[in-house]
Image (tube, helix red, strand yellow):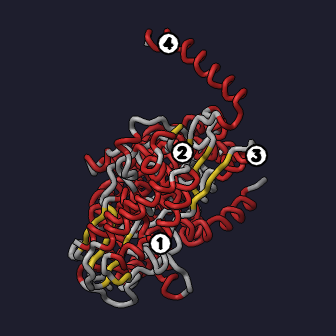
Amino acid sequence: MLFFQRSLPGWRALGGMCGALCLLAGPACASGVVSLNLCTDQLLVLLAPERIAALSPLARDPSLSVVAAQAAAMPWVRADTEAVLRLRPDLVLAGDYGAQAVVAALRGRGITVVQVTEPRDFAGVASEIDAVAQALGQPARGEALVATMQARLAAIPPARRGNAVFWEARGFSAGPGSFGDAVLRAAGYRNAGTGGEMGVEALAAHPPDILITNAAPAYPSLATDMLWHPALRHLRRTSVAPALMACAGPWSAGAVEALAR
Amino acid sequence: MKLAVVAIVVLAGLSLLLGAAGFGLPDADILWQLRVPRTALALLVGAGLGISGAVLQGVLRNPLADPGFLGIGGCAALGAVIAFYWGFTAAFPLALPLSGFLGATLGCVALLLVFSRAQSGPGLILAGVGVSALAAAALSLLLSAAPNPFALYEITFWLMGGLQDRTLMHLGLAAVPIILGCAVLLRLGPGLDALSLGEEAAASLGAPVARTLQLAVLGVALSVGTGAAVAGGIGFVGLVVPHLLRPWVGQRPGALLWPSVLGGAALLLAADMCARAAPLLLPLAAEPRLGVLTALLGAPFLVVAARRVAP
């Protein structure tokens, strides 16, 4: 505590100096990249960890983020306009939903915001990586990341494994055209999900060959409690680490590998 | 009375035939793990809400009293949600009904503190609105600090109330406290009849006024608190049931108790069956929430009842 109090004026002076320098040097004095979204957090850590000014707080949650260990040592910021502006980012990464007011406010102040759309298949993941890597000025790292993902997917032996339902919180299933559908197809399953809510009774009455859920979260969740209803105890089921599916990304190749095993 | 029991038995039989798998007798697993707990919970929760409404209307001498919008249900939800999201329920399943009971007790006590000063009338209902708002605000505040980052989003659906996908364990946890609560409330008949003359008159007749109030709090907290802990926020049953029954059984609060148990059970089961039947009959992607259906039924009822009560 004492140390903190003593060091505080020093930090403040440092911050002030940096701010003054930035004002003098203009946009060339960029302090870094802020990500407001779990999905862009993970791409940022993989593509340009040295430029991170802050990640979203979810990046450090090991049940949602594949880079939680690295992110634990990195600064984080809430999606709050003032908090982000204080960091003087030269680039902000965001998703296309949530924090839209913050994105608009940041753009209004001349800050470049790159928004990414959640991909619906692995080709979409590749172009997302490409777009973020370009924005970060790291196209080569982006290409390497895409190549690794494609090699992992290509290494999965083709097989027909029957029909499957990817069953998520509140009974929503991955429907045709969703990323969950792409993961199932890549692993050799036929997707029997409707894309809407599928209730416990409907699944018990018409069970798929295999029921796929995210692994139970580390915290209590009313929305996922139903996925373990005793009426489904006879179904063949498997689970995927939720961090692999929380965001569609190159790490999702790990979900395909787990399902094809 | 006999007719009501027969009606409930028939409804319960039909309820076991009705579900997402279609109308008809399902396989044993679906029957025992899904339809039996759901049917039994609808009867129990409805019975608890029905008699709690009748007792509250009697004790408070206010025909608009309902455990839902007096804030007792909201306080019970607060208790149950804290127990669930902070992991107490996972560690110790009885924490679910217990926390619902404690929350409901808190709500009842807050209400009675106001009641003793302001007497009954619109002031009491407004106090209930205050208690509800406070419980809802505390719930949001606590959930935003819960370990689950999605807790605030998830809770919206739970608060709308429903009996979808409940298990035999929920039934086991809820049955004893709700039956106990109803049993306590069913014995309050003579006390409620005396109280209908006003507290002072009741006391001068030798009625145990304080004891009646205490037992009413205990019984309402047990049946409503546990009901909310397993079924979420289901409103208006406690308001509607005594009103529907008064033309048949008269104005004496003590005569309303048993009929309200049966009427509440039948009404909530019928509403839950409508929820289950809706996706089979209408082009709906999912079941409508039970609490939404009871509100659709009950809210117009409240407006009519409020007009009748207004001076």
Q: In the visual, does B272 lie left or right of B250?
A: left
Distance, label 3 to label 4, CA atoms, is 35 Å
In the orientation shown, which residue stands out farthest toward the right? Answer: B311
Mark 1 in CB contact with mark 2 (< 8 angstroms): no
Q: Secondary structure at mark 2?
A: helix
The dot on residue A48 is none
Whole-percent x, y for residue B116 in the image: 58, 35
* Location of mark 4 (residue): A7
Q: In the visual, does A46 lie left or right of B63?
A: left
Q: Secondary structure at mark 1?
A: helix
Looking at the rendered structure, the kind of residue marked 1 is Ala
* Mark 1 on the same chain as mark 3: yes
* Location of mark 2 (residue): B140
Q: Secondary structure at mark 4?
A: helix
* Location of mark 3 (residue): A108
Whole-percent x, y for residue A70 in the image: 37, 41
In the orientation shown, which residue stands out farthest toward the front? Answer: A140
Judge whether residue A238 can be spotted in this image. yes
Looking at the rendered structure, the kind of residue marked 2 is Ser
* Mark 1 on the same chain as mark 4: yes
Residue B244, compared with residue B311, is above or below; it is below
Q: In the visual, does B48 lie left or right of B311?
A: left
Q: Nearer the viewer, mark 3 or mark 2?
A: 3
Q: Chain of mark 2?
A: B
Looking at the rendered structure, the kind of residue marked 4 is Ser
Q: Residue at x 43, y 61 (%)?
A: A249
In the picture, which quadrant includes the N terminus of chain B? Answer: bottom left
Q: Residue at x 71, y 28 (%)?
A: A23
Q: In the visual, does A261 lie left or right of A134?
A: left
Q: Nearer the viewer, mark 4 or mark 2?
A: 4
Looking at the rendered structure, the kind of residue marked 3 is Gly
Upstream in sequence: badge 1 or badge 3: 3
